């Protein structure tokens, strides 16, 4: 729209050139490579992949470089690219119980089958700046370490499944009866959003939602705005196989492996007229090592189940339309930043209206007009 302004096209071209110059920075320094971003800014890449809903580390790194480190702009770029890709089909539901674990902790049980694995985490660091990182010093090879001395090679069942085995947890999603097919999942990118939403669509929206927004909402549920007192049943990070059915072969084939973060929150539920008291779940699953996002997602998922569980809806985090309509940072950015575009005609109309209303106000309140003029003169 700025093209309509005198000299607009030339100014926009110059702005693009200036942006490219600022992106490159000091030419005396080597340009940052996509490999460096992917390997050394891995958590930023994970967030862009998760909220951009496209699992491709190289493209996410490119988006971060192009956006000069602006995460939301990078997410926008990746989303835009994603819309150009063909839809080949759907994968089978990912089995996170078969995850190749890189990190696995539980705040509910100390001793777990398979043990607890700390993995790479900031949880136990002192949050003090490390001056040694200012130089490119050698980094020692890591040691294999875990929190539990009882860790073995035995399977690592999900904590929620252990609780459900005692009949104290609501059942998980059941497999299709008689070996049938799963229902086709909803897709917010292909159909208009409508409320109320099914839980699969809500989870999709939360998974691609803004981490900061969901973090704030999750925090609000802990401060009394949602009557939620959850326990982190289990947080696990690792790699899972993505499988697709190949009709010609008659069995599923793995097409690749991706890293995901999964969180299951455990919440007490006092029961209803038809359901006995038990624990309920809040669920989060996102691309990459995005632990905080998966936890925030799980907190919001549980809060949004209030109507389903016949609980009172009293807080913003329990309001489905409020949460889902405002969670997407790309949509939020577009609506907020559109205010930078020219609104000259609209503003002139409002300027004329305010002048007219002010004139009418002073016509009916002459003393106020005199007082204002006297005050202005002083």
Image: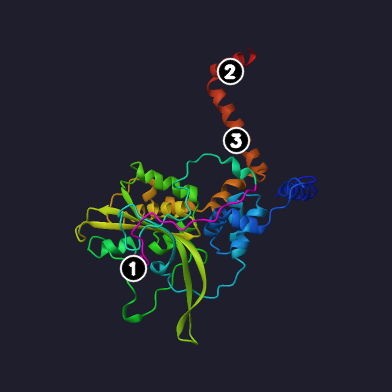
Q: Residues within 10 Å of mark 1 (few under 14, many from 20)?
A: few
Q: Position of residue 343 (x, y in %)?
A: 65, 43
Nearest to the eye among marks 2 and 3: give it.
Answer: 2
Work out which quarter of the rendered image holds the C terminus and state it. top right
Direction from residue 53 to residue 355 in the image, left or right: right
Q: Position of residue 213 (x, y in %)?
A: 47, 48
Residue 264 lies in the magenta stretch: no
Write down the residue under mark 3. 353
Q: Position of residue 288 (x, y in %)?
A: 51, 59
Which of the two labelled residues, at mark 2 and mark 3, occupies the earlier sequence position?
3
CA–CA distance in space, label 3 to label 1: 58 Å
Residue 372's disc is: 2
Q: Position of residue 21 (x, y in %)?
A: 75, 48
Magenta segment, which residues?
Answer: 136-157
Write down the residue under mark 1. 173
Direction from residue 19 to residue 106 in the image, left or right: left
Residue nearer the viewer, 63 or 143:
143
CA–CA distance in space, label 1 to label 2: 69 Å
Q: Are marks 1 and 2 in contact (CB under 8 Å)?
A: no
Relative to residue 369, is residue 204 depicted above or below? below
The local secondary structure at tag 2 comes to helix
Q: Residue at x 22, y 63 (%)?
A: 166
């Amino acid at each position: 729209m700025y093209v309509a302004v005198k000299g607009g096209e030339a100014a926009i071209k110059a702005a693009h050139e200036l942006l490219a110059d600022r992106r490159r920075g000091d030419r005396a320094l080597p340009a940052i490579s996509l490999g460096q971003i992917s390997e050394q800014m891995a958590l930023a890449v994970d967030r862009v992949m998760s909220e951009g809903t496209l699992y491709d580390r190289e493209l996410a790194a490119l988006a971060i470089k192009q956006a000069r480190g602006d995460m939301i702009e990078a997410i926008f770029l990746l989303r835009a690219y994603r819309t150009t890709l063909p839809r080949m089909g759907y994968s089978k539901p990912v089995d996170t119980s078969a995850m190749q674990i890189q990190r696995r902790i539980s705040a509910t049980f100390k001793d777990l089958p398979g043990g607890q694995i700390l993995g790479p985490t900031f949880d136990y660091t002192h949050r003090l700046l490390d001056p040694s990182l200012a130089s490119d010093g050698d980094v020692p090879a890591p040691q294999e370490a875990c929190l539990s001395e009882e860790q073995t090679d035995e399977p690592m069942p999900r904590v929620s499944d252990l609780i459900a085995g005692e009949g104290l947890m609501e059942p998980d999603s059941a497999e299709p009866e008689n070996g049938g097919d799963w229902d086709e999942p909803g897709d917010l990118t292909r159909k208009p959003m409508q409320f109320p939403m099914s839980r699969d669509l809500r989870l999709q929206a939360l998974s691609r939602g803004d981490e900061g927004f969901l973090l704030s909402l999750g925090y609000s549920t802990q401060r009394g705005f949602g009557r939620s007192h959850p326990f982190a049943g289990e947080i696990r990070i690792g790699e899972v196989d993505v499988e697709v059915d190949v009709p010609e072969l008659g069995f599923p084939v793995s097409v690749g492996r991706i890293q995901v973060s999964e969180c299951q929150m455990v919440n007490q539920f006092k029961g209803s007229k038809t359901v006995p008291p038990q624990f309920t779940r809040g669920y989060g699953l996102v691309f990459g090592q995005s632990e905080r996002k998966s936890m925030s997602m799980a907190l919001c998922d549980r809060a949004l189940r209030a109507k389903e569980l016949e609980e009172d809806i009293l807080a913003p985090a329990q309001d489905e339309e409020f949460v889902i309509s405002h969670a997407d940072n790309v949509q939020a950015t577009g609506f907020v930043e559109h205010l930078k575009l020219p609104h000259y005609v609209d503003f002139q109309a409002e300027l004329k209206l305010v002048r007219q209303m002010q004139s009418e106000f002073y016509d009916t309140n002459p003393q106020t007009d005199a007082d204002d003029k006297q005050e202005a003169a002083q």
